[in-house]
Amino acid sequence: MKKIFLIIALIVILGCAQTKNFAYGIKQINSLNSKYNVTMETYPKTMQKISLMLNDLKELKKLRLEAGQESFDYIVDYRSLNLEAEKLYIEGRKYGGAGTTKDGFGCKSRPLIIESVSLRNSSALKGFEAAGLLNEFVGKYPEESKSAGLSFKNVLFLNATFYEISKDARRDSNVINNFCPKNVTLELYQEEFRKKTNMSEDFINKLSYEEAVPIWKKVRGIG
């Protein structure tokens, strides 16, 4: 009799054990989303929190499922790429209005705009990669994507969003290179150095644009 009770108890325990399938994997992802107060379509507010979430996703990628491994990996990889794109976009806005030509600009801001353009372009590339991966996932696993709350609408939204980011970056690049080439910006820096520093005329005159940029940033207190 005791043996029978043990067998019954074992059957009950096994019956209650959760199968590690795609649904289980999504539950872990949703738990991670809750931890950072985000959804599949939103992001943590700071670069620090995005970095922490990326590290958590990296660990979550190690999860081995009994079924649905590939579809789970799609979701984790998509989410990671999307977060990386957002992180680059936030970094690209670190100079505020000085990093874009949209609301007016001065040639001395050229390196800030060029840096911002590079970061926004990198963000767009990551974003398009994320959209491409999501497109594959939705097409290949329609039921799983539905249970994850993702669809082709998300793909369209991502492509449209990162197209605008790419377009704005391209516009800024064209404007700053047309109106503020390196030689013009260098002359402005040299003029400022003569007024605000004790550098010799000979040293200032021999500076290249690439050498002058970090000096100008230091003079202006730009990190």
Image (cartoon, rainbow, N blue to C red):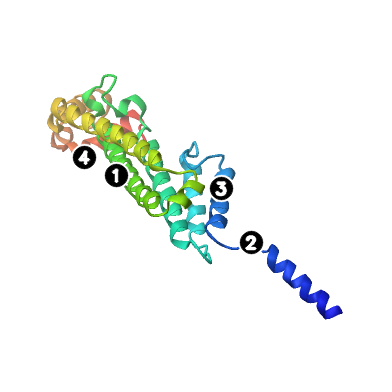
Camera-nearest residue between 111 and 142: 142
Q: Is residue 75 above or below residue 122?
A: below
Q: Is residue 207 above or below residue 143?
A: above
Look at 52% across and 64% down and name the residue there: 65
Q: Amino acid at mark 2?
A: Gln
Say whether marks 4 and 1 touch (CB < 8 Å).
no
The x and y percentages for residue 47 are 46, 41
Camera-nearest residue between 110 and 1: 1
How far apart, in angstroms, are the residues tagged by discs 3 and 4?
48 Å
Q: Is residue 23 above or below residue 157?
A: below
Q: Which mark is residue 125?
A: 1
Quadrant where the C terminus is found in the figure: top left
The x and y percentages for residue 209 are 18, 36
Label 1: few (<14), some or many (≥20) within 10 Å? some
The x and y percentages for residue 170 are 22, 33
Q: Amino acid at mark 1?
A: Leu
Label 3: few (<14), some or many (≥20) within 10 Å? some
How far apart, in angstroms, are the residues tagged by discs 2 and 4?
61 Å
Q: Is residue 156 above or below residue 6?
A: above
Disc 2 target residue: 18
N-terminal label among 3 and 4: 3
N-terminal label among 4 and 1: 1
Disc 3 target residue: 30
Say whether marks 2 and 3 touch (CB < 8 Å).
no
- Element assignment for label 3: helix
How far apart, in angstroms, are the residues tagged by discs 1 and 2?
38 Å
Q: Amino acid at mark 3?
A: Asn
How far apart, in angstroms, are the residues tagged by discs 2 and 3?
16 Å
Q: Residue furthest right?
A: 1
Disc 4 target residue: 211
Q: Nearer the viewer, mark 2 or mark 3?
A: 2
Say whether marks 3 and 1 touch (CB < 8 Å).
no
